[in-house]
Image: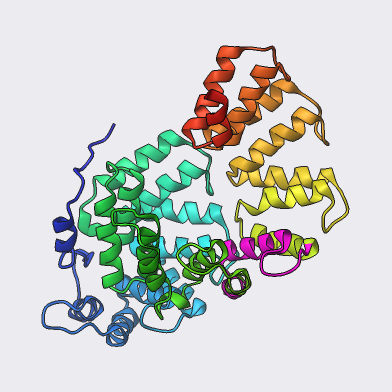
Amino acid sequence: MGRRLAPFTLLAVAGMAQERALPPPVMTNVLAQAHQHWLGQGDVKRDRIRAAGLYLQAAEAGDAEAMAHLGRMHFRGEGIPKDSALAMKWLKASAAKGNARGLYHLAELYQNGVGVPVNHAEYARLLGQAADHGSADAMAELGQCHEYGTGVGWDPAKARSWYEKASEQPRSHFYPMTLAWMHQNGAGFPKDAEAAFGFARLAAEQGYADGPRRMGLHFLNGIGVSKSPQAALEWFTRPDALEDPAALVNLADMLRSGTGVKKDEARAAALYRKAAKSGAPVAMFWVANCHENGIGGPVDFAQAVSWYAKAAEHEFHWAFPRLAMLYHRGQGVTQDDKRAVRWLRQGAEKGSAYSIYLLGWFTQNGWELEKDGARAIDFYQQAGERGWAQSWYQLGHCYLDGVITPKNFSRSVEYFQKAADLGSVPAQHQLA
């Protein structure tokens, strides 16, 4: 195991405001001025437009670090209008010079389908290059890729290795949101919810596009701070958050469930559609889910199929098993288990644990796939290892009832316990 850094205190988080700048080895005066205006350092008042102008001046003079900052600002709309073409132009130029930050943000374009089709394999490849050039954020995200099988093979050991490499980098070499995520999830650092909240707050204070949404999630879920749906609502409805498709999805989630606000499914569905039109795959998924389940309007399986397919085109892994089940049931499309299995296999390739679980279910029942108990058990185990509680629960019943395998009470209890540990209420009842 690699060296782990001690969890950061909130005092240390606050101290990062002066440490954050991520300076390259040699920084031009123009680039230094741009950083000062970006962060509002010293006596310089924060001015994103002025910062963008200075980054542009340095970028046109050939500074790869300035190119990376300018590309990120165009990508995220931080202080200047979003422009995918300019984001791609400057990030490609920066990456071509071997700049770690440019490579990292170019990877994000492929991850999010900004100016190019979504391509998780290319996203992971560029993260690898960025990590090789010293990007701490890229190291952390590569760990996440291996943890979830995004663009690379699912490999928990490699995930841990990359998280540990990231944790060994100087704190000033990270974006605050990366540190927030790592501390929240115990990725490379011990779990520390208060430190995670502090870094999320720092990101919001420094004007990063995802900062308000992350603050809202901390308050919504009580991560490192007292739970407050009202405070979450205030963050999600800030003007900058309302321009963030992901924040719109979080706001829609609150309205759909009635969490901290009056339940309003029609408004939730409208917000999902607005975010989906901005290209957010998670919003496309929820638009489909609303059509499938009659949330905010009538059930429309054909529209559900259409929107799930759009989310799948963006490699949103939750969409694949939902499409498979619609084809299996013949809802919105002609019943077709061959197509269903095709969607499940694509989902499994993208790391969808639910897709792997359903491949086990189809194999157990002989739907399009050859009926094979041993193979079904293998699928269930793969999905369970990826955190899908229903797989362990299903295995528990297989051994309890002697379905596709001889009865084995002790094995059934073992699998019910695994499911219960992941929060499965039916498994908890089974053990009671």
Which corner quadrant of the image does residue 52 belong to? bottom left
* Colouring chosen for the image of the structure: rainbow
In this view, the residue in front, 418 or 143, is: 418
* Residue 304 place in picture, x, y as percent: 73, 62
Whether residue 85 sits left or right of residue 52 in the image: it is right
Q: Is residue 177 above or below residue 344?
A: below
**Residue 253, image x and y in percent?**
53, 63
Residue 98 visible in the displayed image: no
Q: Position of residue 223 (x, y in %)?
A: 33, 53
Left or right of residue 423: residue 334: right
For the stretch drawn in magenta, the main secondary structure is helix
Placement of the N terminus among the 4 image quadrants: top left
Looking at the image, which residue is at 70% across and 44% down? 344
Could you say which is closer to the camera, residue 412 or residue 26? 412
State how many labels appear.
0
Q: Is residue 194 left or right of residue 403?
A: left
Horizontal and vertical percent position of residue 326: 77, 51
Magenta-span inclusion, residue 299 = yes
Q: In the image, which residues are magenta?
A: 273-300
Residue 288 vertical placement versus 31 (above, below) = above
